Image (cartoon, coloured by chain):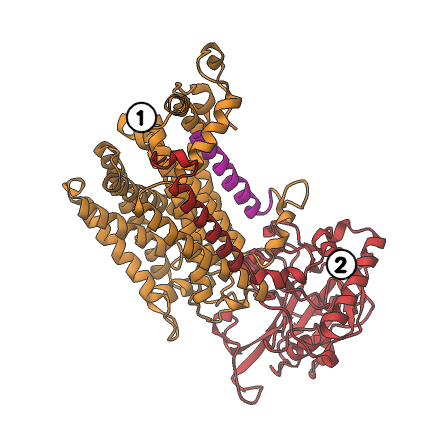
């Protein structure tokens, strides 16, 4: 994946790639398993949760998906809800890439890799959430182009397979290339990554657009069948993505000695100030259209916001989501929010939780209630589903933790090929 | 790396890491242990089986033999599976007379037994809606109606797969596990479906069902006359749907739901045959289709007598 830059051949004192690349990989593996007691506690805790999730999934594969609370009426549940949200988180990282590369913001440039690494972890989680939702994961090879039958371009799901895996590869290349060059103490060759960075910006938009099209294109589900769905997906992604990155930056600040700039956080807050308001505006527009027009197409919205015929399982979810988002918006609007870490962390946490509900339980589930024959069958995730979901979140956080743990020392120059060579000499 | 223990060759940290990795591997093995019993039930032949449209006749014979053996092994039943192909010049259509349907649900029950549905779930490809007179909006329909039928203020509308000419379920399938046969029936390859349930989300008629568990049917209740693309016992984790009883109708018989109907509400036949009863209904009755505005072009029609 990481092609050698031509100038390397001119510097004889630096070992060749055959020597330095394995050393780079080995060094990362060593770093990934080293840290202070907090790091070990965190990783052991996450491993335990991930294993509990794995066990729940193994049970589900063996016994059948009947062990979940999904039914023929609500045939997608917590897994696809989380999948949808995670695509947004993966796309949201691009809100660091755009300032860093399009506007050449130096503060952002120093930490942009934190957003790119988030994309990697989030996409791995997305793919996991799809895999655990499959009734026959053993037949995944039926999806492989060439070997199986890939229903491209008609099925939007095949588009999603392409854009998600493509986005994963693009970000793996960018992060891997930049880290390796830093490790070797060389300047990255713009030819090998700048075009990929620009491609990844467009690609980030595409992953969430295509994912919205999965739902938006279904004429039989009026709740999803709205042109506003994809734009709203993107807007909410540009709330949840920056929110999570700010939380990650604050965590790095408090738990390590690395200086992550206030500048980057300020830009992200400014982005969120705009996107969170647009998201609320779109919510208002949707609610207006549904309730002012009326008719049978609004049954799902009625169910979601107010309950229908005495069924109201989603009502607390959606109002919590709206309350969390509005509260976050108010906090973010305060001019001095960036000077108050506690307030900022609270605002980001609220926004993140609000969007998680909105894109998950508030979007996927009401698409199925009432059903296409207007039956009302409610859905609440059960223990198996929560365990599998927690397991994937834990695995994703492990990947992200390791990625940052490895990337930060290399980026700061603390770990490099030269220093490693000296130590061994 | 800690320097203190370098002289001994192995640092304390390395030992701790090694213990950690061993414990982790053991916990991992324990976590995936349930998969062992599942894996024991899977065969390599099944795993490698090709898509329905790519199976050569002799390969299909082998597959059918394997499935018949599985039915014997898993359910103790002797079944005969056939794979009758669509006939040229045939396109199946179905019409239902709403004036005389009484809502007895005999059709749904017949479907349940004919198509080897899981007994505990009471599954059927047909749902009967009780509709208040004065509205054709299925929002006002009720599936869980009780008491003697027909009620004087209601009419009854059974809904099953509409075998659309423009089927959304076929479009969305990522692996072409569902497609439209030449005689108009939307079929599913139960051995190719990956169980993503996108088709179930896409269908506007609630016509598709998922096998949430392995179907349980007592040996003596299993319908042994089975079609590869229709009523053979489905595997766990795949989609299924109404096939207009393909295993019967392609042999010139009528669907089980029609045979069970005590009122004669149901009319089934070849839309391409100008002499057929269904053509007579389409030409002489005021006919409508469900959710016409979605552009799905159903092959299932509803009509009234008066």
Residue that appears at 64% across and 49% down: B175
Label 1 crowd (10 A; few <14 / some 14-19 / many >=20)? few
Same chain under badges 2 and 1? The reply is: no
- Which of discs 2 and 1 lies nearer the camera? The answer is 1
> Helix or strand or loop: what does disc 2 sit on?
loop
Residue that appears at 36% across and 28% down: A415
Dominant SS in magenta = helix
Chain A on-screen colour: orange
Label 2 crowd (10 A; few <14 / some 14-19 / many >=20)? many
Could you tell me if residue B156 is visible in this image? Answer: yes
Residue that appears at 63% across and 69% down: B214
Which chain is red in the rendering?
Answer: B
The quarter of the picture where residue B122 lies is bottom right
Tell whether position A170 is magenta. Answer: yes
Could you tell me if residue A215 is visible in this image? Answer: no
Quadrant location, the N terminus of chain B? top left
Tell whether position A412 is magenta. Answer: no
Quadrant location, the C terminus of chain B? bottom right
Residue stretch in magenta: A153-176
| Location of residue B119 in the rendering, given as x and y in whole percent from the top left corner | 63, 77
> Helix or strand or loop: what does disc 1 sit on?
loop
Q: Which residue is nearer to you in this view: A417 or B180?
A: A417
Relative to A118, is A49 above or below? Answer: below
Position of residue B24 in the picture relative to residue B177 (left or right): left
Circle 1 sits on which residue? A103
Position of residue B56 in the picture relative to residue A307 (left or right): right
Circle 2 sits on which residue? B183
Relative to A3, is A125 above or below? Answer: below
């Amino acid at each position: 994946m990481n092609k050698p830059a031509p100038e390397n051949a001119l510097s004889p004192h630096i070992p060749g790639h055959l020597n330095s690349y394995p050393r780079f990989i080995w060094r990362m593996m060593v770093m990934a398993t080293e840290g202070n007691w907090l790091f070990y506690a965190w990783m052991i805790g996450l491993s335990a949760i991930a294993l509990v999730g794995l066990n729940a999934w193994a049970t589900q594969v063996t016994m059948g998906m009947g062990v979940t609370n999904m039914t023929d009426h609500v045939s997608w549940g917590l897994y696809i809800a989380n999948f949808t949200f995670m695509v947004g988180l993966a796309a949201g990282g691009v809100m660091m890439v755009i300032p860093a590369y399009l506007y050449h913001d130096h503060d952002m440039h120093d930490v942009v890799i934190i957003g790119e690494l988030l994309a990697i972890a989030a996409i791995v989680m997305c793919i996991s959430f799809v895999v655990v939702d499959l009734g026959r994961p053993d037949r995944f090879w039926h999806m492989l182009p060439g070997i199986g039958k890939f229903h491209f371009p008609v099925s939007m799901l095949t588009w999603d397979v392409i854009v998600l895996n493509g986005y994963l590869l693009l970000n793996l290349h960018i992060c891997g290339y930049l880290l390796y060059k830093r490790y070797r103490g060389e300047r990255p060759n713009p030819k090998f990554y700048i075009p990929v960075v620009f491609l990844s910006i467009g690609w980030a938009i595409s992953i969430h657009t295509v994912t919205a099209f999965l739902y938006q294109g279904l004429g039989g589900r009026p709740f999803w069948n709205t042109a506003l769905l994809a734009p709203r997906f993107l807007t909410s992604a540009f709330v949840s993505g920056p929110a999570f990155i700010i939380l990650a930056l604050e965590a790095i600040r408090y738990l390590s000695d690395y200086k992550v700039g206030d500048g980057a956080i300020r830009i992200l807050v400014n982005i969120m100030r705009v996107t969170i308001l647009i998201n609320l505006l779109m919510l208002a527009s949707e609610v207006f259209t549904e309730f002012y027009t009326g008719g049978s197409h609004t049954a799902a919205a009625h169910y979601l916001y107010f309950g229908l015929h005495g069924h109201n399982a989603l009502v607390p979810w959606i109002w919590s989501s709206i309350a969390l988002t509005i509260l976050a918006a108010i906090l973010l609007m305060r001019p001095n929010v960036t000077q108050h870490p506690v307030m900022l962390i609270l605002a980001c946490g609220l926004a993140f939780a609000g969007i998680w509900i909105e894109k998950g339980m508030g979007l996927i589930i009401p698409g199925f209630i009432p059903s296409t024959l207007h039956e009302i069958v409610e859905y609440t995730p059960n223990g198996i589903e929560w365990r599998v979901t927690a397991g994937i979140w834990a695995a994703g956080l492990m990947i992200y933790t390791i990625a940052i743990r490895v990337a930060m020392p290399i980026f700061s120059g603390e770990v490099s090929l030269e220093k490693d060579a000296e130590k061994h000499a | 790396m800690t320097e203190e223990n370098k002289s001994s060759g192995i640092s304390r940290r390395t030992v701790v890491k090694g213990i950690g990795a061993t414990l982790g591997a053991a916990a991992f093995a324990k976590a995936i242990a349930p998969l062992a019993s599942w894996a024991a039930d899977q065969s390599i032949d099944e795993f490698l089986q090709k898509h329905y449209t790519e199976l050569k006749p002799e390969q299909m014979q082998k597959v059918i033999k394997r499935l018949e053996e599985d039915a014997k092994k898993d359910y103790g039943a002797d079944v005969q599976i056939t794979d009758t192909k669509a006939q040229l010049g045939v396109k199946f259509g179905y019409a239902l007379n709403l004036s005389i349907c009484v809502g007895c649900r005999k059709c749904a029950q017949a479907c349940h037994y004919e198509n080897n549905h899981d007994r505990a779930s009471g599954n059927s490809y047909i749902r009967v809606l009780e509709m208040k007179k004065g509205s054709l909006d299925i929002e006002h329909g009720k599936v869980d109606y009780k008491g003697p039928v027909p009620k004087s203020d209601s009419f009854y509308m059974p809904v099953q797969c509409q075998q659309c000419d423009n089927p959304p379920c076929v479009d969305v399938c990522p692996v072409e596990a569902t497609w439209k046969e030449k005689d108009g029936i939307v079929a599913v390859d139960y051995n190719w479906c990956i169980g993503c349930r996108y088709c179930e989300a896409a269908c506007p008629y609630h016509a598709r069902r998922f096998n949430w568990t392995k179907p349980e049917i007592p040996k003596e209740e299993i319908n042994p006359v089975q079609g590869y693309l229709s009523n053979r016992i489905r595997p766990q984790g795949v989609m299924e749907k109404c096939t207009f009883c393909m295993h019967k109708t392609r042999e010139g018989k009528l669907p089980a739901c029609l045979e069970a109907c005590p009122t004669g509400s149901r009319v089934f036949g070849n839309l391409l045959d100008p002499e057929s009863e269904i053509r007579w209904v389409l030409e002489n009755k005021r006919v409508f289709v469900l959710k016409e505005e979605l552009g799905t072009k159903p092959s299932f029609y509803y009509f009234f007598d008066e």
